[in-house]
Amino acid sequence: MAEMMTLSVRPRAERGKGTCRRMLAKNLVPGVYYNQKGQNISVVVDMLPLTKLHRKVGSSRVFHLEMDMDGKAESLPSLIWDMQFDPLKSTPIHVDFYGVDLEREIKVDVKVVVEGKAKGIVLGGLLEIFRETLEVICKPLDVPEKIVIDVTDLDLGVNLHIDEIKLPAGVKAVYDDNFAVVGIVAQEAEEEAKAAEPAAAAAKK
């Protein structure tokens, strides 16, 4: 397990759009910290450390959120629950943190990464990734950085379903239907599916 990263934030009393604009002009990002007891605290965080942390942990990996609580510095295990970005600059403009109990399971989405060259690709097929992320349940410190799927043995016309995906110890997939995650499709079928898309869209109008 990798060492948990740390991000320092400060409580803030000021609110409102004008205040938030002034913070962003100083490369500060307004946010809110929520915990499992329903408490929420308005905070502000420096933009650069937040951006670097988000690049490393995304919204699924736990980290230490350091904050002054009633005059006492506390380290709170947390997730980045949501982050809003400026549509033009792609910089964060608001962030929500969620405090977690390290001994209680949580549900998170983890990205899917495919490795290996499938048998079906050698035969002329195309790799189709049906799910970019998978919802899993586990304790916060057991959340994997990514879910790696080896498709080397996947043949033409074969899909790999969620119940066949090997997950790390302590991690369980959340699903009702046994959906396909990745598969190898024939190029002809892929081309026919793409050709049918405009007709299907027109029929809905």
Image (cartoon, rainbow, N blue to C red):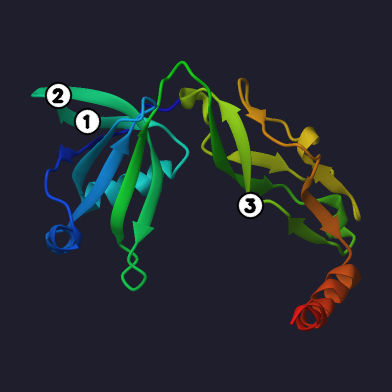
Tell me where residue 63 appears, x and y as whole percent: 35, 32
Q: Are marks 1 and 3 in contact (CB under 8 Å)?
A: no
- Say whether disc 3 or disc 2 marks the residue closer to the N-terminus: 2
In this orientation, which residue lies closer to the viewer: 93 or 164?
93
In this orientation, which residue lies closer to the viewer: 190 or 119?
190
Q: Are marks 3 and 2 in contact (CB under 8 Å)?
A: no
Residue labelled with disc 3: 132
| In this picture, residue 25 sits left or right of residue 108 | left
Residue labelled with disc 2: 73
Determine whether 121 is above or below 142 in the image: below
In this orientation, which residue lies closer to the viewer: 38 or 170?
38
Tell me where residue 197 appears, x and y as whole percent: 79, 77
| In this picture, residue 14 sits left or right of residue 142 | left
Which image quadrant for residue 161? top right
| Distance in Å between CA atoms under marks 3 and 2 | 38 Å
Residue at the farthest left position: 71
In what element is the residue under mark 2? Answer: strand
In what element is the residue under mark 3? Answer: loop
Determine whether 30 is above or below 145 in the image: below
Q: Are marks 2 and 1 in contact (CB under 8 Å)?
A: yes
Residue 66, numbered circle: 1
- Say whether disc 2 or disc 1 marks the residue closer to the N-terminus: 1
Label 2 sits on what residue type?
A: Ala
In what element is the residue under mark 1? Answer: strand
Label 3 sits on what residue type?
A: Glu
